[in-house]
Image: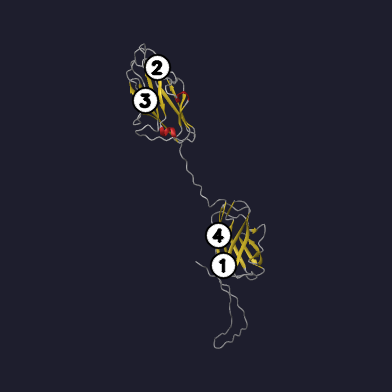
Amino acid sequence: MNLLKIKNTVSVVGALAIAFGGFVAFSANSNRVNAAAVAVTASPIEFAATTATDVTVSFTSGAEYAIGETIVLDVVSSSAATLGGALTDCGTATTTVGGGAGSFGFSSGTATYTFSAASTTATTTASLCIRFPATTAQGSYSISLTDSVGNFGAELVYVGNDNDVFVSAIVRPTLSFNIRNITDTADTNVCAMGAVDTSSLPTADATVTAGEGECGYSLAIATNAANGFQATIQADQVFQNGAADTIANVTNGAAFSAGTEAYGLAWVNPGTAAAGEGITENGNFSTNSTPVPLSATNFISGTGPVTYTAGTDATDVTEVVHGFAVSSATNTGLYSHTITYYVDATF
C-alpha cells in the first residue's frame, strides 16, 4: 500500500479580488508531487545490546533533494524494549547524501537529516549513519523512513539476539541389561549343565549348550553412553556340592579334556554385530577356557554406544558358555554356585 505525500508551493503573481455579485476571482499554481515506496536496508542489521553501535541506513530516491528538504528516520521498538536514550551522530557524522550537503538533528528516537545543499543527481543513493545509544535494550527496532519528496519504507534491526530462538532437547541416558538364552529368544537366569560323567566334554563354542557338561546364555547390554560400558563377573563361591566338595578350576587357555576334572568358562563371544560396536572380552576372558573369579573382575566392555534388539539371533549379544568335566575321582552330588554380573556405563 503506497502512501501519498504531497508538497504544495503557491507562487502568487498577482491577486485581484473584486466582488461582483458575490463572485471572487484569484490566480495561483502548484508544483512537485512525488510518492514512492523504497527498499530500506540497515547495516549492521543485528548487534549486541547495551552497546553503542553505528548503523548505516540506505535507500535510493527517485528524486533529488533541494535545500531545506529532509529525510526523517524514526526508530521505534516493536516490543517493550527501549533505546534508553537519544540517537546521535555516528563516529563519522553524515554530512553528504547523494552529492548534497547537510546534517542530522536528533530528538530522542528521531533523526532528521536536512539538506543545506541540493543533491546533484536525479536518482539519489542515500546512506545515512545514526548511532544507537549504549543504553539500547534487547529487542527488535523498526527504522521507518519518510522524506520531503514522498519516499517511505522501513527496516528492522535486531538487538541482543532478540530475533533468535534457542531450541533444545535432552536425550535421556539409557542403559539396559538382560540375561538371555543362548539363541536370544527369551530371558533366563538358569544355566543347567545336566548330568556329567567321565565321557562328558564341553566344546568351545555355542553349538551344544544344554546338558552333558555345558550350558550357555547371552548377555544383552545396550547403552547410548558415549564412553561405553564396563561389565564385571563374580561368583559367590567355588563350584561345589552340598558336602563342600569342590571342583578344580580349568586352566586359563587350556582345553577341557574328558575324564579330567575342570570347571570354568568354556567360551565367551561378543557376537558379530556387538563386536562391530566395540565390545571386547577383558583380560583372561579373551581366551577360551577361563576360571570364574570369586571377586568382581572386568569381563566385557564397550567403547561407545551399543545397541541391542531382542530377537532370534546372537549377533548383538555376548554369548557365555560354562563347561564341566569330571574324573573318576570326582565326588557325586549337585554342584552349583551363583554368578553375578554388574554393568556400569560412562556417559
Residue 263 percent across, percent down from the top left: 40, 18
Position of residue 142 relative to residue 10, above or below, is: above
Mark 2 surroundings: few (<14), some (14-19) or many (≥20) residues within 10 A: many
Seen from the viewer's position, the closer of residues 244 and 278 is: 278
The disc labelled 2 sits on which kind of residue? Ala
Query: Secondary structure under badge 4?
Result: strand
Disc 4 to disc 3, C-alpha distance: 73 Å
Residue at mark 1 to residue at mark 2: CA–CA distance: 98 Å
Q: Nearer the viewer, mark 1 or mark 3?
A: 3
Instruction: Tell me whether the residue at label 1 lies in contact with that at label 4, contact meaning CB atoms closer than 8 angstroms.
Output: no
Residue 128 location, quadrant: bottom right
The outermost residue toward the bottom is 20
Looking at the rendered structure, the secondary structure element under dot 3 is strand
Looking at the image, which is closer to me, 29 or 169? 169
Residue assigned mark 2: 262
The disc at residue 155 is 4
Task: Kindly identify the amino acid type of the residue bearing the numbered disc 1.
Answer: Asn
**Mark with earlier residue (1, 2):** 1
Q: CA distance from mark 1 to mark 3?
A: 86 Å
Do the CB atoms of the residues marked 4 and 3 lie less than 8 Å apart? no
Q: Which residue is mark 1?
A: 151
Q: Residue 32 — which label?
A: none
Alpha carbons under labels 1 and 4: distance apart: 14 Å
State the mark number for residue 216: 3
The amino acid beneath tag 4 is Glu
The mark closer to the camera, 4 or 2, is: 2
